[in-house]
Image (cartoon, rainbow, N blue to C red):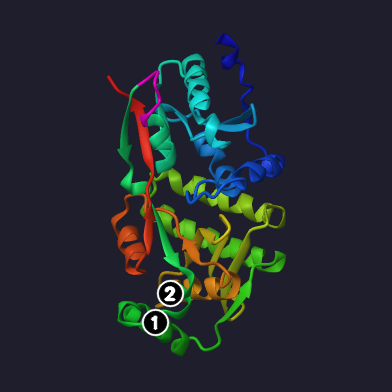
C-alpha cells in the first residue's frame, strides 16, 4: 500500500487548463468550483496541489488550518480506491494539520458514507451552497416575484438611456481594470483588515491577463465610455453557465439588475440554468441571491474523521 503515497503533487499553472478541462468535462458537475478558472483564480490563497493517478484527478489545498482534499474527478467505480489514496496522501503530507474533505458534492459525500475503512462526520456547508436560476427568469424578469427587479432595471434604463452593453474584449478589459481598481480602493478604505479583498483583486486581474486563453465570456455596461459594471463566467456543464465575478458601481441605481440581465441575455440565452455561486455566509449577499428566486441550491459538504 505504501506506493499509494507516491502521488506527485504539482503546483497549478496556466498551462494545466487542458488537463483540468478534460476531467471536468467528462462528467455532469453542478458544483461551481469545478472549473479551471475557479481553481486558477484562488490558487495562491488556497495553495492548491494536484495530480493524476490511474486516470483520476486529485486536488488538495495546503495552506488552510486543515490539509484539505477536494473530491477526486474520475470514473465512479474508482471513487472508493481514490478515497484510500487521498487518505494516504494526507497522512504523509498534513503534518500537524487536521484533515478534511472540502465542499464536496452530495454524490461524493455518499461515497464517503459507505467507505469501509474509516468513518467520517459529514456536515452540510450552507455558506457554500450554489444558487441556480432559470436563464429565462433572469432574462425576462416576468411576473410578480420579479416585480422589484424589473422596477430597478427600468429605473436604470430610464435614467441612463445612453448606457450600452458590450461583450468584453481586449479594449474593454483595460476599462474594466480601471473600474476594478476604483472599486477595491473604496472597499479597502472601509475594510482595511480584509485580506480577501487583495486576493480577489489580484485574481481578477490574472483572469483578465488570460481572458482569451481561458475561453470565458464577459460583459460590461458603459456610460460615457466608462465601465460602470462588468461580469464574466463560463459554461459549467451541458446546460449550465456559471458566473464567476460581477462588479458594479453601487451608487448607480439598478446597475446590478442591468448587468445581470444583460449578460445572461446576450451571452447565455442558450443555457437552461445559471449558477451564480455561493453567498459565503454574507447576509446581504444571501438576501440578494435569494431575491432572484433560485430554482435550486447545490448542496456541498465537508467531511472530517469521526472520533
The structure residue drawn at horizontal position 33% and vertical position 48%, both measured from the top left corner, is: 127
Q: Which residues are magenta?
A: 113-118
N-terminal-most mark, 1 or 2: 2
Residue 257, labelled with which disc?
A: none
Secondary element at image label 1: loop
Indicate the quadrant containing the C terminus: top left, top right, bottom left or bottom right.
Answer: top left
Secondary element at image label 2: helix
Q: Do the CB atoms of the residues marked 1 and 2 lie less than 8 Å apart?
A: yes
- Answer whether residue 196 is magenta in the image: no
Q: Residues within 10 Å of mark 2 (few under 14, many from 20)?
A: many
The structure residue drawn at horizontal position 42% and vertical position 81%, both measured from the top left corner, is: 153
Q: Answer with the quarter of the image where residue 267 lies.
A: bottom right
In screen coordinates, is 298 left or right of 235? left
Where 1 falls versus 303 (above or below)? above
In screen coordinates, is 165 left or right of 188? right
Real-space Cα distance between discs 1 and 2?
7 Å
Where 254 falls versus 180 (above or below)? below
Indicate the quadrant containing the N terminus: top left, top right, bottom left or bottom right.
Answer: top right
Q: Position of residue 159 (x, y in %)?
A: 45, 88
Residue extending furthest toward the top: 2
The structure residue drawn at horizontal position 32% and vertical position 58%, both measured from the top left corner, is: 286
The structure residue drawn at horizontal position 48% and vertical position 64%, both measured from the top left corner, is: 273
Q: Position of residue 129 (x, y in %)?
A: 37, 50
Q: Answer with the quarter of the image where residue 292 lies.
A: bottom left
Q: Position of residue 231 (x, y in %)?
A: 54, 64
Nearest the eye: 216 or 174: 216
Q: Residues within 10 Å of mark 1 (few under 14, many from 20)?
A: few
- Magenta stretch secondary structure, dominant: loop
Pointer 2: what residue? 137
Q: Answer with the quarter of the image where residue 186 lies.
A: bottom left
In screen coordinates, is 63 left or right of 232? left
Pointer 1: what residue? 142
Amino acid at each position: 500500500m505504501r506506493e499509494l503515497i507516491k502521488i506527485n503533487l504539482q503546483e497549478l499553472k496556466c498551462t494545466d487548463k487542458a488537463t483540468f478541462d478534460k476531467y471536468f468535462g467528462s462528467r455532469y458537475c453542478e458544483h461551481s468550483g469545478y472549473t479551471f478558472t475557479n481553481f486558477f483564480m484562488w490558487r495562491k490563497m488556497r495553495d492548491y496541489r494536484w495530480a493524476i493517478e490511474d486516470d483520476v484527478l486529485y486536488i488538495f489545498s495546503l495552506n488552510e488550518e486543515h490539509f484539505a482534499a477536494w473530491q477526486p474527478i474520475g470514473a465512479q467505480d474508482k471513487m472508493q480506491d481514490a478515497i484510500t489514496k487521498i487518505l494516504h496522501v494526507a497522512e504523509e503530507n498534513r503534518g500537524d494539520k487536521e484533515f478534511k474533505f472540502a465542499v464536496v458534492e452530495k454524490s461524493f459525500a455518499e461515497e464517503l458514507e459507505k467507505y469501509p475503512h474509516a468513518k467520517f462526520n459529514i456536515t452540510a456547508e450552507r455558506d457554500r451552497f450554489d444558487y441556480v436560476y432559470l436563464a429565462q427568469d433572469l432574462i425576462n424578469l416576468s411576473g410578480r416575484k420579479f416585480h422589484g427587479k424589473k422596477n430597478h432595471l427600468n429605473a436604470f434604463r430610464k435614467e441612463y438611456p445612453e448606457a450600452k452593453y458590450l461583450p468584453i474584449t481586449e479594449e474593454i478589459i483595460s476599462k474594466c481594470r480601471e473600474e476594478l481598481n476604483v472599486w477595491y480602493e473604496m472597499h479597502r478604505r472601509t475594510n482595511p483588515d480584509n485580506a480577501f479583498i487583495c486576493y480577489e483583486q489580484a485574481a481578477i486581474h490574472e483572469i483578465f491577463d488570460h481572458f482569451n486563453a481561458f475561453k470565458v465570456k464577459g460583459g460590461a455596461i458603459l456610460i460615457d465610455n466608462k465601465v460602470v459594471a462588468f461580469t464574466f463566467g463560463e459554461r459549467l456543464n451541458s446546460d449550465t453557465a456559471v458566473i464567476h465575478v460581477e462588479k458594479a458601481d453601487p451608487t448607480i441605481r439598478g446597475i446590478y439588475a442591468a448587468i445581470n440581465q444583460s449578460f445572461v441575455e446576450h451571452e447565455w440565452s442558450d443555457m437552461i440554468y445559471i449558477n451564480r455561486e455561493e453567498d459565503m455566509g454574507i447576509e446581504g449577499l444571501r438576501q440578494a441571491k435569494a431575491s432572484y428566486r433560485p430554482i435550486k441550491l447545490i448542496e456541498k459538504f465537508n467531511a472530517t474523521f469521526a472520533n
